[in-house]
Every structure is written in structure tokens, then in C-alpha cells.
Image: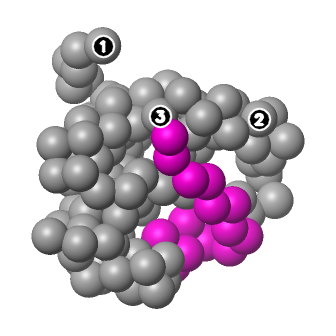
Amino acid sequence: MKGPVLCGVDESRTADGAVHVARELAERYDLPLVYVHVFDGHSRTDAVRRALRDAADAADADVAIEAGHPADRLVALAEARQAAFLVVGNHGPRGSALGSISADVSRRAPCPVIVVPPTAEVGA
């Protein structure tokens, strides 16, 4: 297995579970870890950027900040970096299995996609 584990991160609480799962995968398979934040003009990019850098330093990970539609940028980055895995959180409505971003990424990604639900119990 080669290529990094990409982890889509936003300012929501659901990103915590995705970060944990991505870190575990990177450690288990001895792969590089890249936290990816995609902003569309509505997110608090400066605060997210600082939090990502802190988390990346703690996990010996890289950070990618992208502008555009989250699903488009995550899929494009997974292709460009030949990702081994793409990990995203899910904060879609309760009645649906996946939110729109995680569903779109799952359909189009060139690698396995792990969708971490907001109710996932992940250990520290």
C-alpha cells in the first residue's frame, strides 16, 4: 500500500472522529498523513488553519488548504497524491445514510473512502 491517508477536516465537531480514524490508519499502515481543509468562502480559514497546523505537528502530518467545492477538491487531491485512503466525517441529516459531501466523495474517489459518522465512538 502506498500514498498518503487524506483526511478532510472542517470546523465541525464531526471532524474529530475523522482525524482519529485517519491517524490510526496512517500509523497502522505506516503511511503519510495529510489533513485537508477545503474552504468555499464561508469557513473560518485562519482559525482552522491554526488548529490544523497544531494537529499536524502533533501527528507528524502535512496540511493542505484548498479553495473550492469540498467534494471536488478532495477527489482531485486524492487523485493527484495517489491517496491510499480518504477519510471524511459525516454530518448529513439523520434520515440519510450519508451527507452530500461524503456521498459525492464516496462515489468519485479513486481510493477507498472511510466515512466516520458523528456518533462514532473513537478512543483517544
Q: Secondary structure at mark 3?
A: helix
User: Looking at the picture, does residue 110 appear above or below residue 70?
Assistant: below
Q: Give the alpha-carbon distance from disc 2 to disc 3, as whole Å.
A: 14 Å
Q: In the drawing, what numbered circle is on residue 35?
A: none
Residue 112 location, quadrant? bottom left
Q: Which residue is mark 3?
A: 59
Q: In percent of the image, x 38 and y 56: which residue is there?
A: 32
Using the image as rendered, state which of residue 54 and residue 93 is in the foreground.
54
Residue 85, horizontal then vertical, whole percent? 25, 63
Kind of residue indicated by mark 2: Arg
Q: In the drawing, what numbered circle is on residue 124?
A: 1
* The C terminus, quarter of image: top left
Kind of residue indicated by mark 3: Ala
Q: What number of labels is visible?
A: 3
User: Looking at the picture, does residue 68 appear above or below residue 123?
Assistant: below
Disc number lying in front (3 or 1):
3
Horizontal arrangement in the rendering, residue 50 relative to residue 102 (left or right): right
- Tell me if residue 48 can be seen: no
Q: What span is in magenta?
A: 60-75
- Tell me if residue 28 can be seen: yes
Mark with earlier residue (2, 3): 2
Q: Which residue is mark 2?
A: 50
